[in-house]
Amino acid sequence: MSDSSWGAPPTGQTGYWGPTEGGPVQGAAPAGPAYDAPEAQQTRPMPIVPDVPGVPAYGGDQDDDRRAARTGGPLLRDETFQVRELPAETQNPEHPEPMPDVPQTPPAPQKKSAGRDLSAAIGVGVGLGVLIVASLFIVKAVFVGVIAVAVVVGLWELTSRLQERQGIKAPLVPLAVGGAAMVVAGYVRGAEGAWVAMALTALAVLVWRMTEPPEGYLKDVTAGVFAAFYVPFLATFVALMLAADDGPWRVLIFLLLTVVSDTGAYAVGWRFGKHKLAPRISPGKTREGLVGAVLFAMVAGALCMQFLIDDGAWWQGLLLGLAVAASATLGDLGESMIKRDLGIKDMGTLLPGHGGIMDRLDSLLPTAPVVWLLMVVFVGSS
């Protein structure tokens, strides 16, 4: 092979060498050892790699294989041609180089979220609990005032959302005055006083709306009477419980069982919930959550009736807890229906992490008459 000389590769063919008659070309590299070895017959031509504008012919260590292809002949069959990704600014759009497969890191699984600011919700809940318990056991009249304020704010939220979303103008002034009077009458005069105040409030709504044009009169007064029943009248049963000799303990049990029911539904539903309870009304509620609410409320009811109420029995607490879980769930679903009809998520924004006052009263309002009635049946009204 020393008698043969090697010339420059033909135009457009990189890495090709052939014999010439003119002798060796100045600066040409001799054939590599691949052509001197017996295994040279097992080699195959190197595929043509187009030059990429902006990239030097020899790029350092990463181009060792290319240098071998250009100066030492084609690669051996068992060698592997390594291709590295070029920077975006040097890639040739007309002749893109193959891209190596890059393993994709799977996204981290998302954790379940409660949908609210839990720290704010817990802080507000603890603050309200301290206020309620302090007023409940110090002076009963102060707690009656707390109920009246909650009723007035709840009526304001409800009537405001009705007007904003549906154009329904339920008269707020007679509702607020009549609602506060309803709570006081229930505490002072009992159930009879509450019914009389309810009737007078409904009459005041009808008369008050007559001062405006007749268009929409029927829907406005209907919404007004509904608001009077839904918020202040149901809240009056809390005042009825408070009027008993052990009234503060009855009210405390009512509040505890409702909160425990909601907590059990949330905890069990968030952890184990798979089957929707009422997907068209409240997609977040599950059957497993309802079971959790029942279990938590029944256990809490048995303990409360056994140790907090004179002449109370644990089995009465079981029934009371079951009834509270059912009424609290129905109350929550009822307000969810109202909010879905209005196209809103919360009734208000007064309580960070909770929404509005009505968003906290949704379970309490329908539960109040249930607890009052069962307490009267189990241990009497006084």
Image (tube, helix red, strand yellow):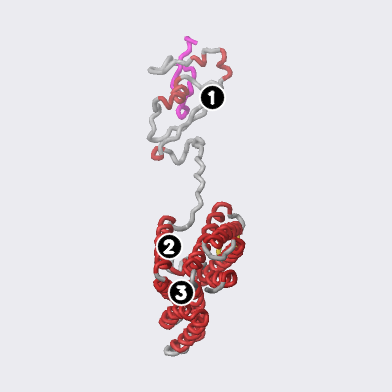
**Which of these two is toward me, 351 or 47?**
351
User: Tag 2: Cα neighbours inside 10 Å, few (<14), some, or many (≥20)?
Assistant: few
Amino acid type for the residue under numbered disc 2: Gly
User: Tag 1: Cα neighbours inside 10 Å, few (<14), some, or many (≥20)?
Assistant: few
**Which of these two is toward me, 115 or 328?**
328
- Vertically, is 268 above or below 74? below
Q: Is mark 2 on a helix, strand or loop?
A: helix
* First in sequence: mark 3 vs mark 2: 2
Mark sitting on residue 158: 3
Q: What stretch is highlighted in magenta?
A: 1-21
User: Is residue 230 rendered magenta in the image?
Assistant: no
- List the residue tagged with mark 2: 129
Q: Which residue is pictured at 56% across the width and 12% down the height?
A: 38
Magenta residues, dominant SS class? loop
User: Is residue 20 rendered magenta in the image?
Assistant: yes
- List the residue tagged with mark 1: 45
- Vertically, is 364 above or below 80? below
Discs 1, 3 touching: Cβ within 8 Å = no
Discs 2, 1 touching: Cβ within 8 Å = no
